[in-house]
Image: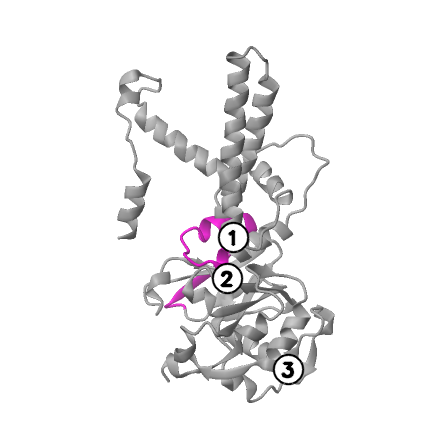
Amino acid sequence: MNKDDEQILVVPSEIIFAREKWQGLKTDNLDYYLELIKNNCQFKRRGDMENDPSFQQIIPYIVFNFKDKYFVYKYLPKAGEQRLVDTYQLGVGGHINEEDSAGNKGAFKLIENKPESLIQGNADVLEIGMMREWEEEVDFKGKLLEKKLIGILNDDSRPVEAVHLGLVYSFTGDSPEIFVKETEKMEGKLVALEEIGKHIEGNPGVWVQIVYRYLSKTKISGDFSKKYIATLKDYQEFCKTVAREFDDPEKEIMTWGLGISGEAGDVAGCIKKTYSHGNDQKAGIKENLGDTLWYVAAICNFFGWNMEDILNENAEKLKIRYSAGVFTEKDAAKRERIDWNEKATRKNE
């Protein structure tokens, strides 16, 4: 069957968003929205739904972890989704099909999001569809210790995401033996949480970035007893604990971008008053430099970048520019002037 002819589970957008329309990962009132989906779902032809914002296509999105490592996978050249080749994904999942409502023998039902409430019996279509996708995509050799819904993901910043609604589940296993089934199309592995950012950096998807930021914030608790920050990595992790949470990723990055310009302006203002007005504000220079670095860390965390990598890349660039290892006017004068608007345009062509 052509995938456009599949009958997939959808819910009218006006029903899902009757109370509110959120942007990002919603983590409250989850039971209400699950019941709303179950009581108002219907099956429609997939090809008719792909560009119809009046319906939301329900997508289970499973994030698996074993201890402190998470399962990521990437598409290989033989994968059908050519636009995603060589990009890493974090969530396992897909559409719920009409066949998922046909039978449920031996399935499991998730009650109140508690692992001890998993009972064998008649499961709802959401649970069956989620587990079918899980079993189709991966081969997990161990036992699932926990399965829980952690949020409902909506993002309408792009047409593709605007017609999909993600049910984000966290699966915790007792074994690291998890493998992709379609090995000619995909390859997967377990990576530490702090390494996920590097792996998904080239992924154009919005969902993967939103879920990664959520995991980063919820897995890290601020240790305010430490007097010193030993490394840039420590500082980045600490900044995550005291950063405001946003439902809208665009609003978040705009806040960090405007914040860094404001703090840099404060640094300049204190320097001016210290040396032009004779009003010693060196303490202000120092404090505002720290605030500027906080925004640098926030921006790096948003994009999943490591501050140490950025500093090392900058150092390598300077080594090339000043090949003798010291500053010279001649080397400074011949440095490349980059027009980032032009560079971005060429990259997108």
- Looking at the image, which residue sits at the far top? 278
| Residue at x-position 60% and y-position 32% | 230
Dot 2 amino acid type:
Asp
Say whether disc 1 or disc 2 marks the residue closer to the N-terminus: 2
Q: Nearer the viewer, residue 186 or 332?
A: 332
- Asked whether residue 118 is drawn in magenta, I would say no
Percent position of residue 211, x then y: 54, 57
Lower sequence index among marks 1 and 3: 3
At label 2, counting other C-alpha atoms closer than 10 Å, the crowd grade (few under 14, some 14-19, many 20 or more) is many
Q: Residue at x 40, y 72 (%)?
A: 51
Task: List x then y, in percent, for residue 348.
Answer: 30, 52
For badge 1, the amino acid type reads: Pro
> Dot 1: few (<14), some (14–19), or many (≥20) neighbours within 10 Å?
some
- Residue 34 in the image: above or below residue 103: above
318 vs 347: above or below: above
- Tell me, yes or no, if residue 273 can be seen here: yes
Question: Can you tell which of label 1 and label 3 is closer to the viewer?
Answer: 1
Which region is colored magenta? 183-209
Locate the N terminus by quadrant.
bottom left
Circles 1 and 2 in contact, beta carbons < 8 Å: yes
| Mark linked to residue 123 | 3
What's the distance in space between the residues labelled 1 and 2, CA to CA?
9 Å
**Label 3 neighbour load within 10 Å: few <14, some 14-19, many 20+:** some
Q: Residue 13: x percent and y percent?
A: 53, 73
In the displayed structure, does residue 98 sit left or right of residue 173? left
Q: Splitting the image into 4 quarters, where does residue 280 fall?
A: top right
Location of mark 2 (residue): 155
Question: Compared to 343, does 278 lie above or below?
Answer: above
Apparent side of residue 8 relative to residue 65 in the rendered image (left or right)? left
Name which of mark 3 and mark 2 comes first in the sequence.
Answer: 3
Q: Secondary structure at mark 1?
A: helix
Q: Is residue 76 visible?
A: no
